[in-house]
Image (cartoon, rainbow, N blue to C red):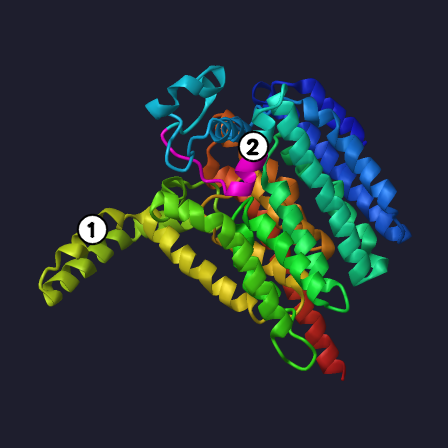
Amino acid sequence: MLVAAALALAAVHDLARHLTATLAILAVATLAWWWAVRSVEGERRLSLGTLLLVALLMRLPLLFLPPDLTEDPLRYLWDGRVIAAGANPYLLAPESEALAPLRDELWQRLPHRQVPTVYPPLALGAFSIAAASPAPMLTWKAIATAGDLAVCALLFALLRRRDPALVARSAWYAWCPLAAFESAGMGHVDALAVAGAVAAVGALLARPATTRRVLAAAAAAAAGVLVKLAPLAALPMWARTLRTADGRWRRGAIFLAAALALAAAGLVPVAVACGGLPPGLVTYGVSWEWNGPLYEPLHRLLAGTDADGAAKRLLDATKEATGHPPALNRVYPYLYPQFLAKLLLAIAALAAVAASLFESDPVAGSRRLFGRLIVCSATVYPWYLLWLLPWAAADRHRPWLLAAALAPLAYLPQFSDVDLFPFVWAAVWLPPALLAGWLAWRRRRGAASAEAAS
């Protein structure tokens, strides 16, 4: 049924014009996914060949599906074209006249032509390979699909190393409709970076933790960072989990130093060329917002309570007390509810990274860390759940698996008259939150009963 759903999606083609049918097919595929994985978990046996065969059959039909629900692959191919032409996409936005000779029908369809690229160097290298091929979009989607299938195999190996009885849980990722749809169907780059993250954690779990294995983990983690920056947040936590039995940090220090050095080798030249943070990345951090679990209600709450007005009055008082330094005037443009919400959530995200340093299991720690970062993010597109899905699969974390099932609903506001907030936002985020609360209540009740019995 999972393969049939993939074929049905491929037959729909113009997904934006048939969004209801698309979501209905994904809903059927999600139910089939839930049933299929629970079945193989019950049998407690699943071979890597079977896992990958079903995953491949799900993804093959989607390779030929036009990515109608996202414009990201268009930007990937444009950035790859700019790289191949020897220009700097970190400084030259698509609208730059210096890139006028590269313009064609692809350029006409590009979104956000005023924003330079936000993608790290390894991602741009992959984009340039696809852009130089005879069939750029198909080549790119094949690369993204290969990365996604690599995640499936790496997660299987990770679980076999962790506990051979749990390898069937890898199907929660491999057969997930969201994973197949967003990689093979919509062609998002995230699967390549996720493959690096899963490879890194798999190497960290290998015993004995030889220097060679630690360096391999560092290389995989750095590769993930150079595709998308998200794994940077997990590097300290992954290093912390490598602490040896006698409490020394030598292996963790080697991992962290090597991962940061390799990542810096790719990122520092970009920062030097840009004179600091790439302008596209700054624009993304300040201006992008969509479907953040806490962000959507938080910025409305701040607006309703005049928090921005209170912040401006506080700044006025600070200026009075400090002699009106001109530098403080630069702060006023940022004192609006949306930016204040992002600032508060950025502080919470830093707290999540700090809390991750107390983790001892890199798998559960990755689930908690990436989950908290998603909750704190102002922008959560459906494919962002791919960052969390392998770890949720490994721990069979039902609230996040439910979130992955509901995530495609976030496409509704972009291609229909349905408002994101509160209706679609509530449909995507409230059921997982309620399920998490109910499960936590059950655990506390069970612990209380066990304590009373003892």
The quadrant holding residue 19 is top right
* Residue at x-position 33% and y-position 52%: 340
* Residue at x-position 57% and y-position 58%: 259
Q: Amino acid at mark 1?
A: Arg
Q: Which residue is mark 2?
A: 127
Say whether residue 239 is left or right of residue 32.
left
What kind of element bears circle 1? helix
> Can residue 306 be seen in this snapshot?
no
Give residue 110's position: percent from left, percent from top: 45, 24
Please tell me whether residue 119 belongs to the stretch shown in magenta: yes
Q: Nearer the viewer, residue 355 or 317?
A: 355
Give residue 87's position: percent from left, percent from top: 42, 30
From this viewpoint, which residue is outermost toward the top? Answer: 105
* Residue at x-position 70% and y-position 79%: 245
Give residue 440's position: percent from left, percent from top: 64, 64
Q: Give the total number of marks visible in the rendering.
A: 2
Quadrant in which the N terminus appears: top right
Give residue 317's position: percent from left, percent from top: 14, 63
Q: Which residue is mark 1?
A: 330
In the image, the segment drawn in magenta is 114-126
Please tell me whether residue 141 belongs to the stretch shown in magenta: no
Residue 202 numbered tag: none
From this viewpoint, which residue is outermost toward the bottom? Answer: 454
Q: Nearer the viewer, residue 207 or 178?
A: 207
The crowding category of the residue bearing disc 1, from other C-alpha atoms within 10 Å (few below 14, some 14 to 19, many at least 20), is: few
Q: Nearer the viewer, mark 1 or mark 2?
A: 2
What kind of element bears circle 2? helix
Q: Amino acid at mark 2?
A: Phe
Say whether residue 312 is left or right of residue 190.
left
* Residue at x-position 57% and y-position 39%: 382
Relative to 251, residue 201 above or below: above
Q: Nearer the viewer, residue 247 or 293?
A: 247
